[in-house]
Image (spheres, grey):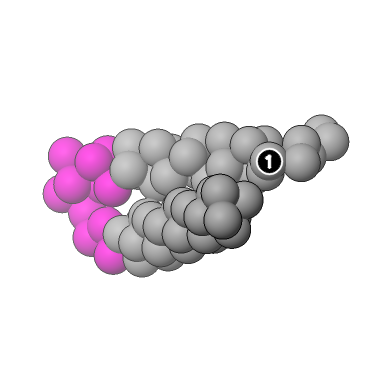
Amino acid sequence: MIERIDGQVGLDSIVSKRKNARRAVISQLLQGRDPTKFLSIWDNLNRELDNHRVESEGNNISENT
């Protein structure tokens, strides 16, 4: 897959992985298992998504000034 200049492909990938991690956490909880592994994956993806948002906001600010 070719990444577009605006990074939307990378963002879509992060969002998709995050949804899958959330589903895994819920599944583990429903089965009475420890979801710690999936919680840490979900947390890392949330941080990555936040970083992506901060970078894109920074780009928007620099383009506007």
Most prominent secondary structure in the magenta stretch?
A: helix
Residue 1 lies left or right of residue 12; in this view the side is: right
Q: Position of residue 15 (x, y in %)?
A: 47, 40
Picture mark count: 1
Q: Residue furthest front?
A: 65
Which region of the structure is painted magenta?
Answer: 25-37
Reply above or below: 31 against 53: above
Magenta stretch containing residue 31, yes or no? Answer: yes
Q: Position of residue 26 (x, y in %)?
A: 23, 41
Q: Quadrant of residue 59?
A: bottom right
48 and 18: which one is in front?
48
Q: Position of residue 6 (x, y in %)?
A: 68, 41
* SS at badge 1: loop
Task: Say whether residue 45 is visible.
Answer: no
Residue 9 lies left or right of residue 30; in this view the side is: right
Reply above or below: 44 against 65: below
Q: Residue furthest right?
A: 2
Q: Residues within 10 Å of mark 1 (few under 14, many from 20)?
A: few
Task: Say whether residue 10 is visible.
Answer: yes
Reply above or below: 17 against 58: above
Magenta stretch containing residue 39, yes or no? Answer: no
Give the residue drawn at x 51%, y 55%: 61
15 and 51: which one is in front?
51
Q: Position of residue 34 (x, y in %)?
A: 23, 60
Q: Quadrant of residue 47?
A: bottom left
Give the residue drawn at x 22%, y 54%: 33
Q: In what quadrant of the picture does the N terminus appear?
A: top right
Under mark 1, the amino acid is Asp
Give the residue drawn at x 63%, y 37%: 8
Residue 58 lies left or right of residue 38; in this view the side is: right
Tag 1 residue: 6
Residue 58 lies left or right of residue 42; in this view the side is: right
